[in-house]
Amino acid sequence: MENSGAVEGIEYWLQWQVLLCALIFVLPTALAVRLLRKRGGGSDPLKPVDLWAPCWRNLHPRWLLFYRAFAFIAMAYLLYETVAAFGFFVFFFYTQWTFALVLVYFAIATVVSIRGCRRKPIQTGEKDNLLKKDMEEKLGFLENLLQIIYQTSAGAVMLTDIVFWCLLLPFMSGENFKLTLLIGCMHSVNAVFLIIESAVNRMPFTWFGLIYFVLWSCSYVVFQWAIHACCVKWWPYPFLDLSTPWAPLWYLALALVHIPCYGLYVLLTKAKHAVFSTWFTRSFVRFPEKKEI
């Protein structure tokens, strides 16, 4: 999409709407960073076993491992096909950023599951001792990174798929854009795989993760502004264009939509615990509610 206005160069960045748009994503970023620093070394009930053990008592951790490995391979293949078809140009889009993030999640989750499954006790009587020992350990760098990416990915896939199917597709379909099987998979498989993952794993999901989601989206905006200031004059999404007086409203709407998108996933995880703990009282392991900070 070409700029709708004739202003270019330094004058483009001196327009009044640019300052407002900058404040719209700079302020949430500053608030998110402050909340992260405020959290500091607060207590976290999450233990290593919660990252590789399923929330179903009769389901062996290997099944979660196999699923994570399958999701990683399937998504890696789809991303490869997308890059092969359109080139690395696709990484200008938020969709591919999110898709790659979910791919990284399943890669790390597979490694964590492998490490967990390798600790399987030789005899049944040793199982309780192993889990007790694992519960006493603290999370390492890889485990903390996995939890952060999990929360970030959840909000990002909701935003990506909802915006595509409900906003972009209905208004952009035409000669310049046609929905294909590959494009459809790129905007649905990420959410499907992650929701199934959430139905099987025992990782908690709280509102605090919204901070990581906000920082992720702000990083994408900074990336787009940086490459646009350097050489690229085309915006991958029309609502990111700063040349229109309506730009601040678009940026504000995009900032606010993060809350319901992330909240939708919070509701899904809460529904999981509410429904499964009622219907499958003997087989479902309900994770203790994590305190919000």
Image (cartoon, rainbow, N blue to C red):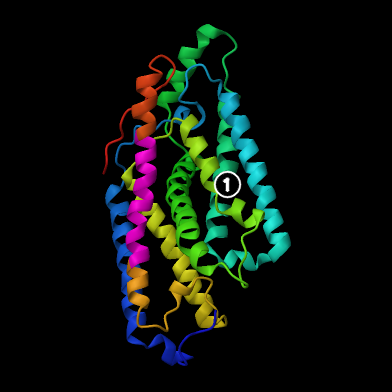
Q: Position of residue 166 (x, y in %)?
A: 45, 58
Locate the C terminus and report the quarter of the image it occupies. Answer: top left
- Does residue 6 lie above or below 113 as drawn? below
* Point 34% across, 41% down: residue: 206
Tell me which secondary structure the magenta stretch mostly adopts. helix
Residue 265 falls left or right of residue 97? left
- Mark yes or no: residue 205 visible: no
Instruction: Say whether residue 61 is left or right of residue 43.
Output: right
Q: Residue furthest right?
A: 84
Give 117 or 74, whichever is nearer the viewer. 74
Q: Helix or strand or loop: what does disc 1 sit on?
A: helix
Residue 11 in which image quadrant: bottom left
**Looking at the rendering, which quadrant does residue 90 occupy?**
bottom right
The amino acid beneath tag 1 is: Val
Residue 70 at x, y percent in the picture: 65, 37
Residue 27 position (above or below residue 277): below
Instruction: Tell me the quadrant of the picture where the N terminus can be found.
Output: bottom right
Residue ID at (55%, 65%)? 93
Q: Which residues are magenta?
A: 253-270
Q: On the image, numbered disc 1 is attached to which residue?
A: 189
- Please report the residue visible at 43 percent of the width from the left and 88 percent of the height from the top: 12
Q: Quadrant of residue 84?
A: bottom right
Q: Is residue 154 above or below residue 10?
A: above
Residue 130 image offset from top left, x and y in percent: 49, 17
Is residue 256 visible to the viewer in this orientation of the structure?
yes
Q: State how many labels appear.
A: 1
